Image: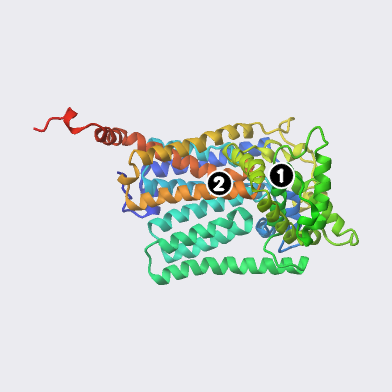
Amino acid sequence: MPTIPDTPFNKRIWQDPESRLLLWIATAAIIIQFICFKILYPYPNFMPPDSHSYIAAAESNQFVNIWAIGYSKFLRLFSSFTSSDLALTAFQYFFLQGSILYLLYTVRYLLGPSKTAFRIMFGCCVLNPLMLHISNFVSSDALFTAFSLLWFTQVLWILYAPRPRLLVLHAVVLLCAFTLRYTALFYPLISILIIMFKRLKAWMKIAGIGCIILLLGVFIGRTSYSYYQETNTWQYSPFGGWLLAADALYGYAYANPDPPESVPAKLRPLHVMVNRHMDSMRRLPQRPDANIGVYYFWDFKSPLLEYMYYTWRKDSVAPYLQRWGSMGSLYGAYGRYLVVRHPVLFARRYLWPNLIRYYAPPPQFMEVYNMQRDSVPMATARWFGWRSNKITTYFKDRHILISQYFTALFAFINLFFVMGFVAFTCLGGLRRRRQVQQKILWWMLIVWLSNMCFSVIAAPIELRYQIFPMVITLVFGIQLTTFILQEQPTALKRPLQACVPKQFSITEKK
């Protein structure tokens, strides 16, 4: 049974020769990888319209935007030091790798993997080329992945030995992740549950949970007020309403049309336009919504965008954010109506395909560089201080082929983790772990399941959204396999002996 060292975590890294050597090797490898990568991709990667919207929101210092505002605020803060795109992508990459190393050394300290297992974890994570590509995007993906890894690693430390300082830092990390992407909506719930069930003094529980609620409450309140100023409606994020309606339409597209008179009055004009759109879709030889994606959310032919423009037809000067944000509440209500009205079709046409995508997420934006364009808007070029808006790469073909291999690899990693956890549990591995290690493994499973459920329900899944679960699933899959291999003879002997009747036992009592 692996034991947790008595030496403090920081000292353990520097006093253990192998840990110290691997840290130096990782540092050198990270720097060399980044230098070689920037020779091949001297400019950042952009995904229209996300990247340019982040920059526009940073330039105008907005507090709300179509996307979560955290990355725009980060860009504005970073620009106060330098406008260098090289410095930006370097910071994103080094910060992401630093959070990975923090996770790896924490797992080694708390769970005690073998040297071979730890070296495999180390190589698979530190040398992963996907980390370079995700960090090269002008997007929240790399930062959100890094903060998610920090949040998860802090969860492990809270399960082991919570301290007041750790609980405060945990609330700050939660806030950062929360501002970067809406996927973090379930993070606070997990953190609060862990603190509640952890044996702590009452004042520590109150302080830890209070810090989380206070920081997130202030941010949510300030964001809701900003949307009220922009759209005259109180809402935390119109994005959720748009997503719910767009997701629900994938199911309703294959339903018998609901008559307008059966729909609530406030939703009726929108529903009439949706019915008209679905009627025309049925006549197409090839439907644009045959596969779940961004059609109902972003395509200008989508009934959601058509209805938005129809609603605002008399006010063409209103900012796009005001028009877009004002529809969030209505679309959320319409999405809920469609899901409740057609739950089976919603599950069959949206949830099930998206669950398959979680198992093997498609690369989407990650498989092409700058959407195969050779330029960016002039506003983006000015933000980085470029003289020209042209961008180049070492490769003539702008497809990033390596990302396609990770779709199959992610499918293997998910299967590898699930089978490892089931086998480890059935062989009695959990019973032979220390209590804190049992809790770590169970909460790891809860985080993985929560992420899967939230991702499948929330939006069509892409590879770039799943870097965080890919890392922790790979690390814990290797760890579980190590436990099984180390204790296989003992684990198999007990269930086999239990199946053999005593009168047929080959072992004689001396």
Where residue 65 appears, as percent x and y from the top left, is: 73, 59
Quadrant of the frame with the C terminus = top left
Residue at point 38%, 39% (across, down):
424
Q: Secondary structure at mark 2?
A: helix
Residue at point 69%, 60% (across, down):
237
Q: Residue reaching furthest left?
A: 510
**Amino acid residing under circle 2:** Met
| Quarter assignment of residue 470 | top right
Where residue 443 appears, as percent x and y from the top left, is: 44, 51
Task: Give the labeled residue for mark 1.
Answer: 250
Quadrant of the frame with the N terminus = top left
Whichever of labels 1 and 2 marks the residue nearer the N terminus, that label is: 1
Seen in the picture, residue 4 relative to 366 is either above or below; the reply is: below
Q: Secondary structure at mark 1?
A: helix
Residue 38 seen in this snapshot: yes
Residue nearest the viewer, comparing 245 with 473: 245
Residue nearest the viewer, comparing 27 with 210: 210
Residue at point 40%, 71% (across, down):
202
Badge 1: how crowded within 10 Å, few (<14), some, or many (20+)? Answer: many
Task: Give the labeled residue for mark 2.
Answer: 452
**Amino acid residing under circle 1:** Tyr
Residue at point 59%, 34% (across, down):
406
